[in-house]
Image (cartoon, grey):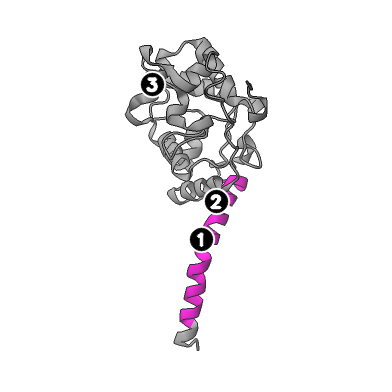
Amino acid sequence: MMTPLRRVMIGSLLILAWPAAHAADGQKVFTQGGANPAAMACLGCHGPDGNGIAAAGFPRLAGLPAGYLAKQLQDWRNGSRKQPVMEPLAKALSDDEIKAVSTYLASLPAVPAGDLHRQQIADDPTTRMALYGDWSRQIPGCVQCHGPGGGGVGEHFPPLAGQPASYLVAQLNAWRDGSRSNDPNQLMVGVAKAMTDEEIKAVAEFFARPASQEVTP
């Protein structure tokens, strides 16, 4: 017969082991998919390390805030963000699986944001747009919300640095056409609609460029 002390000891061990098991579940969702067969493994599109597949325009997820990642999956479920692959996948994940995989991805190493040399290259139109925006058209500088180097700020302003240019272009166009409308106060909708096609492409390429390739003074 199990003594009361032994029961307490086993219960304590189970409680201590729960966070590790929870994290392992997130890794399993990422590498193998969810319990529902429609919830496919994430690594097929986002790479084995979560750093995306730039050539295909698949974004990196590694190091993004867990709250941001979970919100995007919930938004694909409720229709405020649309994408033909991600919508059914998000709907097939349980709430626990969304939380677990988001936590796991947030724990992976993030790509460092580069130094954008704010003073030295502000005459370049693309850099000026990224750093300062164009307030005559109500466009804030990208880094004013997304942080120094485009490295992201909190759960509402994700990193831009190191994301594939084609992915960034696709998101700005999604804000424009209404297939994405899940930003706080509809800020990105106004910004994207005010930018030209050329500006969108240039800014996307600017942030996609590895830090080692940034323009130096």
Q: Is residue 97 above or below residue 53?
A: below
View extreme (left): residue? 185
Disc 1 target residue: 19
| Badge 1 vs badge 3, beta-carbon distance below 8 Å | no
Residue 167: in magenta span: no
Q: Position of residue 162 (x, y in %)?
A: 59, 30
- Nearer to us: label 1 or label 2: 1
| 183 lies left or right of 58 | left
The range drawn in magenta is: 7-33
Q: In which quarter of the image is residue 139?
A: top left
**105 lies above or below 130:** below
**Is disc 3 in contact with disc 2, using a CB cutoff of under 8 Å?**
no
**Residue 82 in view in this figure:** no
**Three-letter residue code for mark 1:** Pro
Q: Earlier in the sequence, mark 1 or mark 2?
A: 1
Residue 171 in percent (x, y) is at: 49, 24
Between the C-alphas of marks 1 and 3, the distance is 38 Å
Residue, disc 3: 189
Q: Which residue, given by chain and number where applicable, does mark 2 sit on?
A: 26
